[in-house]
Image: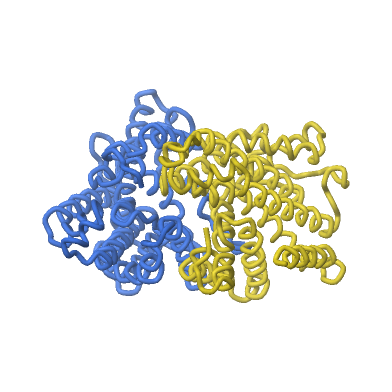
Chain colours: A blue, B yellow
Amino acid sequence: MYFQLHRRRRGDFTSLINFFPLLRIRIGKVTGGSPLIELGAYTQLLVSYTILGGVYGLTALGLSLIWGVMKAVNWAHGDFLMLGMYVAFWTVTLLGIDPYIAAIVSFILLGLLGMMTHIIAIEPVVEKPGGHEATLLTTLGISVILESLALILWSPSPRSYYNSYKNTFLEVLGVRTSVAEAIAFMISIISIVAVDQFLRRVRIGKAIRAVSQNPIGARVVGIDVPRIRLMTFGLGVALAGMAGVLVSTFYPNIRPLAGSVWDIASYVVVIFAGLGTIYGVIFAGILIGILEGLGTIIFSNAFRQILVYAVFLMILLLRPQGLFGKALRRV
Amino acid sequence: MRLMMKLTLSVALLIVGAALPLFVDELTISILMQAYLWAFLAMSWDVIGGYGGQFSLGHAAFLALGAYTSTILLQSYNISPWIGMWAAGLIAGGAGALVGIASLRLRGPFFALGTIAFAELVELLLLYFKEITGGPLGILITKSGPENMLFNTQTPYYYLTLTLAIAGILFLRWFESSKFGIGLIAVREDEEAAEGVGINVYRTKVIGATISAFLTGIGGTIYAQWMHFIRPDILVKLDYSTQIAAIDVVGGAGTPYGGLIGALVLVPLSLYLNALFGGMIAGLSVILYGVVLLIMVVLAPGGIYGLVRGKLRGGRKGGK
C-alpha cells in the first residue's frame, strides 16, 4: 500500500483533517446548545489552535536556523521530527522514563544524527553553484531513506504510549486544555527564548550569527565556517527531535509518515516569520494556528487549509522577506 | 564528420526505440513508456527549472490541471483528449503564468516553497470543488477507443510517449538556440545584466513558466489517459513535483538530453527495485532510490549528461 513506487505521503494533507480527533469530540459535546455555549466552543477552538501554533513555532525553529545560516532547505525536517516521536515512544515504553526526559535524549540523539546527515548530504554540495537546489534534493534523498527505514523497522501502523499528561486537563475560564498541550506550548516558548539567548550570548552562537550574516567575512575573522555549519545543522535537527517528543505527548499518532503533517506547516511558518528572526517563528506559528482556527470557525474544516495557503501565497508575494524579517538582499 | 556521427547515432537510437516493442515483453514496454512520459515531464520542467533557473517544486499542479481539464472535457462534454490536451496545456499554461509572475518576487528557496504552496492549494481546490472534480474520489475514465486516446495494450502508449519524448528533445534543442531561450538563460545567469542588455526579464520569466506549464499540462493529459482515472491525492503530490525535478537534475538540467537520461535511469530503477523487493521488504527499493538520488546529486552536480560530457572532453566539468 505505502510503497507503490516512491510515492510518499508527504503532500497528503487529508491527514491534517484528522488532526484533532480529540478536539472534535470535545467540541461535539459542547455544541448544539445555546449560542453562548457555542461561543465558548469557539474560544476553546481558538485556544487549542493557538497552542498548536506555538508548537508549530518550535517545529519551525530548527528549519529556520538551518535556512538562515546556510540557505539550505532541510527537506527531511519532518522526518527528524518523526524520529523524535519514536525516540519518545521507545524510551518511554522500554525504559519507563518521563517523556520530558525523553525530549533531552532525543535532542542529543537527533543532534548526532543531524551532524552525520550534514556531513553526508549538505557539506559536499552547499558551497557549489546551484547548492541550494542540490540541498533540496540531497535532503529529499535523506527523507526518503529515513521514512523507508522507519517503515521497515516499525511498520506503518500508528503507535502511542501511555502518558498521564495527555489525560489530565487544565480548565481556565471554561477553556480546557490537556496538561501535555500546555507544557508543550510553554517548552516551545522557552526553547525559542533559549535559542535566541544562545545566539546572542554564547561564543558559538555569535559565530553562527556571523556566518549567517556574512560567511566570507566570518571566514576572514577566523571562524571555522564548515564547523559552524555542522553545528548549526546538528542544532536544527536536535530541535526537530525535541519538538517531535513534545508533539508525541499530545498527538498520539506516532507513525513513519507522521512528519509530513508537520514539515509543510514548518515551511509555512518559516516563510511567515521571515529569515533572521528567532522570535518571529513563535509569532508566525501562533498566527497560523489562529488562522487555522478562524478558517475552521468561519468556513469549514476542509477550507481552513485553503485559507492558510492562500494567505501564505499572498504574504509570499507581497512581502517575501516575511512578516518579521528584514528586507532581503539577493539570495 | 562529427555531425555525421551524431546523425547516425540518433537514427540508430531512433530505430532501436521504435523497434523495441517487437522484442520485449509487455512489462518492459510499460516501464519504458513510463520512462518516456517522465522524460517529457522533466524536459517540460527543464524549460523553467533548468534553462530558467527557477527551481519549481509545483509542477505536479500543472500535471493535475492538465489531466483534469482533458478528462473533464472527455467525460462531461465528450471532447476527445486529442483536442482536449491542447485545452489542458492552455489551462496549465495560464496557471504557469501566475507562477511565473510569482518568480519575479521570489528567489531561490522562496520560489521553491511558493510553488509547493501553489501545488498544495491546487490539490485542496480540486478536493473542495467536488461537483466538478469528483473530490477525493476523482474521475474514472469510462470511454474507450483510440479516438479518445484510450488503448487496450501498452504498445500504443509506448509510441505515443516515445513521440512525445523525441518532440521534447527536438523542442529543447531548438529552444536553447532560439532568441527567447538565450534570453532565458541570460536571465538565469544574471538578471541585472540581462536587463541591462535589453532583455525584458518580466516577460521572459512569465513566458518561460507558461511554456513549461503548457507542456506539463499536455503530459498530464497523456498520464490521465494511460492511468484511466485521476485523483487529487495521486496527482498533486509533492512526490511528483520533486520526482520531475529530480529526474531532470540527475540527468542533467539545462540540457536537451538530461530529462531522457534521468528518466531512463531513475524510472526503471525505481520500478524494477520495487518489483524485486516490493514483495519481501517493502521499503528497501525506496531506500535504494534515496541513496542513488543522494549519491548522484553529491557526486555529479551537472547530472549524468554533464559527467559523461565532461569525461568525453577530457576531464572538463560539463553541466549547465
**Most foreground residue, A195 or A324:** A324
Residue A166 vs B100, above or below: the answer is below
Relative height, residue B311 to residue B157 (above, below) = below
Choose between B237 and A85: the one closer to the eye.
B237
Q: Is residue B271 left or right of residue A324?
A: right
The x and y percentages for residue A252 are 40, 56
From the viewer's perspective, is residue A238 above or below residue A294?
A: below
Image quadrant occupied by the N terminus of chain B:
bottom right
Tell me if B241 is positioned left or right of B137 in this view: left
Above or below, B4 against B142 in this view is below
Count of numbered marks: 0
- Name the residue: 75% across, 60% down: B33
Q: Residue B217 vs residue B241: left or right?
A: right
Residue at the top extreme, as displayed: A35
Furthest residue toward front: B1
* Image coords of residue A117 (percent x, y): 37, 69
Horizontal and vertical percent position of residue B167 = 73, 51
Q: Is residue B24 visible?
A: yes
Q: Please identify the quarter of the rendering in which residue B94 is found.
A: top right
**Which of A6 and B314 lies nearest the eye of the viewer?**
B314
Q: Closest to the observer: B148 or B172?
A: B172
Estimate the x, y position of residue A302 in percent, counting from the top left: 51, 37
Choose top left, top right, bottom left or bottom right for residue A307.
Answer: top left
Residue at the spot 30% in from the left edge and 41% down from the top edge:
A176
Q: Is B51 left or right of A90, judged from the image as shown?
A: right
The residue shown at (26%, 48%) is A185
Q: Can residue A148 be seen in this view?
A: no
Q: Residue furthest left?
A: A201
